[in-house]
Image (tube, rainbow, N blue to C red):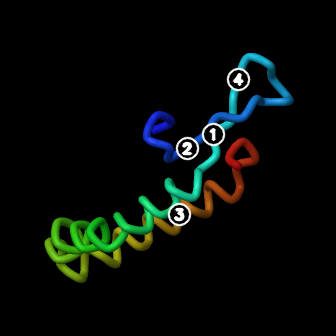
Amino acid sequence: MTSRGLVTRIKCKEDARGVRIALTDKGRATIGAAVPGHVAQVRKLFLDAVPPKHLDIIANISEAVLEGLEDDDTVS
């Protein structure tokens, strides 16, 4: 992705062994262009294939996972 100009590497001040990755303007534009197709595929392959009563179950599970992430101080 770096060679395609989508991200750039930035030295990590906190840990000289590591680097941080930053999205470039080109990377942001590439993601933006991919979003409509991605959303359409998720809808087609997942949401349209699952009966509404099961979507409620998935929503409940997702909410529980999100609550767990909010309570976990190791996730940033």
In the drawing, does residue 74 fall left or right of residue 68? right
CB under 8 Å between discs 2 and 1: yes
Give the mark, 2 or 1, whose residue is nearer the N terminus.
Answer: 2
Label 3 or label 4, whichever lies nearer to me, is 4
Q: CA distance from mark 1 to mark 3?
A: 30 Å
Tell me the kind of residue under disc 2: Val
SS under mark 3:
helix
Tell me the kind of residue under disc 3: Ala
Q: Which mark is on residue 7?
A: 2
Tell me the kind of residue under disc 4: Gly
Q: CA distance from mark 2 to mark 3?
A: 33 Å
Picture coordinates of residue 26, whole percent (x, y): 51, 56
SS under mark 1:
strand
In the drawing, does residue 22 fall left or right of residue 5? right
Label 4 or label 2, whichever lies nearer to me, is 2
Q: Name the residue that disc number 4 marks.
A: 18
Give the mark, 4 or 2, whose residue is nearer the N terminus.
Answer: 2
Q: CA distance from mark 4 to mark 2?
A: 15 Å
CB under 8 Å between discs 4 and 1: no
Q: CA distance from mark 2 to mark 1?
A: 6 Å
| Residue at x 14% of width, y 72% of height | 49
The outermost residue toward the right is: 14
Give the mark, 1 or 3, whose residue is nearer the N terminus.
Answer: 1
Please, is residue 19 above or below residue 63 in the view? above
Label 1 or label 3, whichever lies nearer to me, is 1
Tell me the kind of residue under disc 1: Ile
In the drawing, does residue 67 fall left or right of residue 2? right
Q: Which mark is on residue 21?
A: 1
The outermost residue toward the bottom is: 52
Q: Name the residue that disc number 3 marks.
A: 64
